[in-house]
């Protein structure tokens, strides 16, 4: 779904038969000004989406942009100013803020995780734990914060997790049938496989046929053991039980990637407010 379509559906959901609060008490001829005020420090995300909300509600609203997506913001900053029909600006207000507050919260969280592993070789990845219908926005916000995007969906990478392996009949069979599937369907996709212990890591190394090994719920010490066994033959990714408080130890193990569902799954929206200007 495109950005335009997502915004369109969002506005339909919110406006319905009309913004009766604004229609009831504000004369349509009134032209006013509003400003987007930052009320919490963080990383800015969603200005482009806000611009699309404004465009779809009423192109007569003029946005004067002061700050850009990816900028560090602090309390008291003004991100942009709006000028136009007061009714329309109020109609756009909540949808605009919903996008920007959530996206800025994600970008801020992403920056914290990226900063926590600075100086190591490890890159932080997001996951598919996103809000249904908003993945394109949320993954963009992750990128703005300095972390990286994992696969966008089920279609752009093979990930053989524990359930896939168990249903397929084991590690070796899961890998072999996957490689046959890719060949038969003329697909060029990377293969990642999840391992739950060092014995499974050894089986994957012995069998081969994958690009990346996920080390799921391994401690930093166990990851080091696994990396010694892998010896650079495959990319490596750590996942499970990793928080902002303990991530540095995982990164210092030497693993290539750490995937963090909390980047989009357990985030706090950033406090932003659209205010009337005298």
Image (spheres, rainbow, N blue to C red):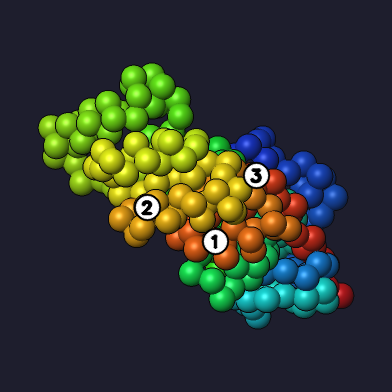
Q: Which residue is mark 2?
A: 230
Secondary structure under tag 3 reads loop
Q: Which residue is mark 3?
A: 241
Q: Is residue 52 visible?
A: no
Callout 2 touching callout 1 (CB < 8 Å): no
In depth, the one of 91 and 150 nearer the eye is 150
Q: Which mark is residue 160?
A: none
Circle 1 Cα neighbour tier, 10 Å, few/some/many (<14 / 14–19 / ≥20) = some
Question: Is residue 38 positioned above or below 148 on the image?
Answer: below
- Quarter that holds the N terminus: top left
* Front tag of 2 and 3: 2
Secondary structure under tag 1 reads loop
Work out whether mark 3 precedes mark 1 in sequence or the reverse, and give the earlier one. Answer: 3
Q: Residue at x 20, y 46 (%)?
A: 188
- Please tell me how many numbered marks the rendered image carries: 3
CA separation in Å, label 2 and label 1: 13 Å
Q: Which residue is mark 1?
A: 253
Q: Residue at x 44, y 55 (%)?
A: 227
Q: Residue at x 26, y 38 (%)?
A: 207
Residue 103 position within the rendered picture, expressed as x and y whole percent measured from the top left? 63, 57
């Amino acid at each position: 779904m495109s950005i335009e379509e997502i915004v369109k559906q969002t506005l339909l959901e919110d406006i319905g038969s009309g913004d009766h609060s604004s229609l009831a008490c504000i004369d349509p001829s009134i032209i006013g000004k509003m400003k987007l005020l930052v009320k919490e420090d963080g990383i800015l995300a969603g200005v482009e989406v806000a611009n699309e909300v404004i465009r779809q509600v009423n192109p007569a609203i003029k946005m004067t942009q002061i700050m850009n997506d990816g900028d560090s913001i602090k309390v008291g900053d003004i991100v942009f100013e709006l000028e136009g029909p007061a009714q329309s600006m109020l109609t756009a207000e909540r949808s605009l803020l919903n996008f920007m507050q959530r996206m800025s919260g994600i970008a801020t969280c992403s920056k914290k995780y990226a900063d926590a592993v600075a100086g190591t070789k490890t890159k932080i990845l997001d996951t598919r734990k996103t809000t249904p219908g908003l993945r394109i926005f949320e993954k963009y916000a992750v990128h703005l914060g300095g972390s990286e995007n994992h696969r966008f969906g089920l279609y752009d990478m093979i990930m053989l997790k524990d359930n896939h392996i168990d249903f397929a009949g084991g590690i070796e069979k899961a890998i072999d049938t996957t490689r046959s599937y890719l060949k038969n369907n003329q697909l060029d996709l990377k293969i990642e496989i999840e391992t739950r212990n060092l014995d499974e890591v050894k089986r994957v190394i012995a069998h081969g046929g994958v690009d990346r090994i996920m080390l799921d719920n391994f401690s930093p010490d166990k990851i080091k053991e696994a990396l010694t066994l892998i010896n650079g033959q495959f990319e490596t990714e750590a996942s499970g039980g990793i928080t902002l408080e303990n991530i540095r130890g995982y990164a210092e193990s030497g693993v290539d990637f750490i995937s963090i569902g909390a980047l989009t799954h357990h985030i706090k929206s950033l406090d932003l407010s659209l205010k009337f200007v005298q």
